[in-house]
Image (tube, grey):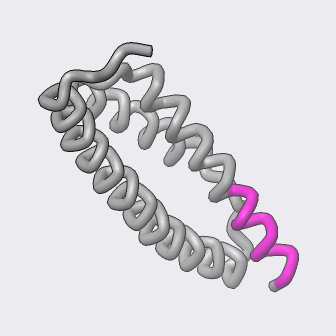
Amino acid sequence: MSTIDPSVQAELSRLRDSIDNIDAAVVHILAERFKCTQQVGHLKAEHQLPPADPSREAEQIARLRRLAESAKLDPAFAEKLLNFIIAEVIRHHETIAKSA
């Protein structure tokens, strides 16, 4: 088994610490986003609006793809991520509507 050069190990540790911090930030940002979408779900349920809004979703996907491109992130990956989030939001909205 080879040993890792201490300077390489230190750089790996520094980068991994940054990754861990970013992951924590992403989780907190998603939590805030879902708090907002829960409020949207309650508003929709209160006014008998459908859980899904395909035109809004299409706008958001196009917007996120543009943001991803400008950030040098694969737009297809960004779209997959947003589609996953949208599906979860719709599921929450359907649950809220059923309990209203």
Horizontally, residue 49 falls left or right of residue 18, namely right
Q: Residue at x 36, y 20 (%)?
A: 74
The part of the chain drawn in magenta is 90-99
Name the quadrant of the C terminus: bottom right
What secondary structure predominates along the stretch shown in magenta? Answer: helix
Report x, y in % for residue 92. 71, 65
On whether residue 93 falls in the magenta region, the answer is: yes
Vertical relation: 56 (above or below) 65? below
Q: Residue at x 55, y 73 (%)?
A: 40
Horizontally, residue 100 falls left or right of residue 27, namely right
**In this orientation, which residue lies closer to the viewer: 33 or 7?**
7
Vertical relation: 48 (above or below) 3? below
Vertical relation: 28 (above or below) 26? below
Find residue 8 and report its image quarter: top left
Q: Residue at x 30, y 29 (%)?
A: 68
**In this orientation, which residue lies closer to the viewer: 22 or 93?**
22
Vertical relation: 8 (above or below) 48? above
**In this orientation, which residue lies closer to the viewer: 21 or 90?**
21
- Toward the right, the furthest residue is 98
Report x, y in % for residue 47. 67, 79
Report x, y in % for residue 13. 25, 41
Find residue 91 and report its image quarter: bottom right
On whether residue 48 falls in the magenta region, the answer is: no
Q: Residue at x 71, y 66 (%)?
A: 93
Horizontally, residue 4 falls left or right of residue 26, namely left
- Toward the top, the furthest residue is 2
Report x, y in % for residue 4. 28, 22
Name the quadrant of the N terminus: top left
Find residue 3 and report its image quarter: top left
Horizontally, residue 96 falls left or right of residue 79, namely right
